[in-house]
């Protein structure tokens, strides 16, 4: 498209969830509570894993990485969502929008890789228990963790560079609460075919490959569980990975619906609602499931809490 004699856009306006003030205030309170609970829950997991030496094993190191990731994953988008609930004019610069796009998709890619790694870790622990300590040593665990972060931040780099070279000359309203790919492409007055094709191809390959790897690991786990002679052993073994599978199902279900498809027109209202699930609900469900369903985490939390109460009581007695 010819962009000569057109005004260059320097900032975008988020539309968020439109509605009357009462509805927006209700959404603000609801989203704020979910966001704060997510931050507190994930921070608590990191604290417990860091403080209790018995939890410093590959499974919980990966869980700590996931919790740390979820904190920044939600922080990349939710503050702007909250702002759109309070104000009808919430802006972001073009460079800020592209930066948000990059960090959102980087952390999303990191989560996909990390979930696949966590599934592989459970596969080794259940299907090869005698060789687990050798195959998933502390050094290997750190390499997998670092690889997840590095791979996640490399994945969206080329599409982001191409987006940064697009021209935006109006309109400047983003029909979303963060800088997602479709709204950005819709606002560009440049030819976006190449960057759209590359972006959706990279996203689809990453999501589907990590999803298939994750499901393959769980497929082998299910076969191993079925072969166990004791029903009690089957139940105990499955419970160790059921929480992880729940998080995986919610997360992949929403992102596959949103991103694993060719570039096409779609309903932005439905897209915004679906986005709330992988931007806010999954980061909240993660700490809830891992803490409420995991005996080791609950035991470590009670131990740490008892120790803190004891130290506090002793310090108060000195006064």
Image (cartoon, helix red, strand yellow):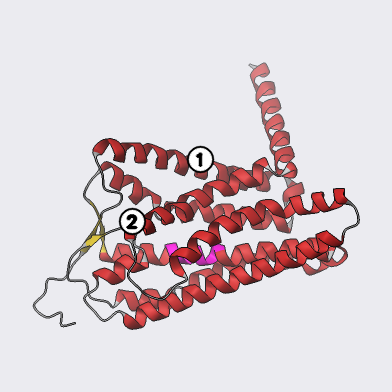
Quarter occupied by residue 173 = bottom left
- Read off the residue under disc 2: 269
Q: Are marks 2 and 1 in contact (CB under 8 Å)?
A: no
Horizontal side of residue 152 vs 49, given as left or right? left
Give the vertical position of 311 relative to 24 (above or below).
above
Horizontal side of residue 194 vs 13, given as left or right? right
Front: mark 2 or 1: 2
Q: Nearer the viewer, residue 213 or 124?
A: 213
Instruction: Kindly state the secondary structure of the residue where label 2 is placed.
Output: helix
Q: Nearer the viewer, residue 289 or 312?
A: 289
- Read off the residue under disc 1: 37
Q: Earlier in the sequence, mark 2 or mark 1?
A: 1
Q: Which residue is most to the left?
A: 5
Kindly identify the residue that appears in the image at 79 percent across and 61 percent down.
125
Region in magenta: 104-111
Kindly identify the residue that appears in the image at 35 percent across and 83 percent down.
194
Kindly identify the residue that appears in the image at 74 percent across and 55 percent down.
57
């Amino acid at each position: 498209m010819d962009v000569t004699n057109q005004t260059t856009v320097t900032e975008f306006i988020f539309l968020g969830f439109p509605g009357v003030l009462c509805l927006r205030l209700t959404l603000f309170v609801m989203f704020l509570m979910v966001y704060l609970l997510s931050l507190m829950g994930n921070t608590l997991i990191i604290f417990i894993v860091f403080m209790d030496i018995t939890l410093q094993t590959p499974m919980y190191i990966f869980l700590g990485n996931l919790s740390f990731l979820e904190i920044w994953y939600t922080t990349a988008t939710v503050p702007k969502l909250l702002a759109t609930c309070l104000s009808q004019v919430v802006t972001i610069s073009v460079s800020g929008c592209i930066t948000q796009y990059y960090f959102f998709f980087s952390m999303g890619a990191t989560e996909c890789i990390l979930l696949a790694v966590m599934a592989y870790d459970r596969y080794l622990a259940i299907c090869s228990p005698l060789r687990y300590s050798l195959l998933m040593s502390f050094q290997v665990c750190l390499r997998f963790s670092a690889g997840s972060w590095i791979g996640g931040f490399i994945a969206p780099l080329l599409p982001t560079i191409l987006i940064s070279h697009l021209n935006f000359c109006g309109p400047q309203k983003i029909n979303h609460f963060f800088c997602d790919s479709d709204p950005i492409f819709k606002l560009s007055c440049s030819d976006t075919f190449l960057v759209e094709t590359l972006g959706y191809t990279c996203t689809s390959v990453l999501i589907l490959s990590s999803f298939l790897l994750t499901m393959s690991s769980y497929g082998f786990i299910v076969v191993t569980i079925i072969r166990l002679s004791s029903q009690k052993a089957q139940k105990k073994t499955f419970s160790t990975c059921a929480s992880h599978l729940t998080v995986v199902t919610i997360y992949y279900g929403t992102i596959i619906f949103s991103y694993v498809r060719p570039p096409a027109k779609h309903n932005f209202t439905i897209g915004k609602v679906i986005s709330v699930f992988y931007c806010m609900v999954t980061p909240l469900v993660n700490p809830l499931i891992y803490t409420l369903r995991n005996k080791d985490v609950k035991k470590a939390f009670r131990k740490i809490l008892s120790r803190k109460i004891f130290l506090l009581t002793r310090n108060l007695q000195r006064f």
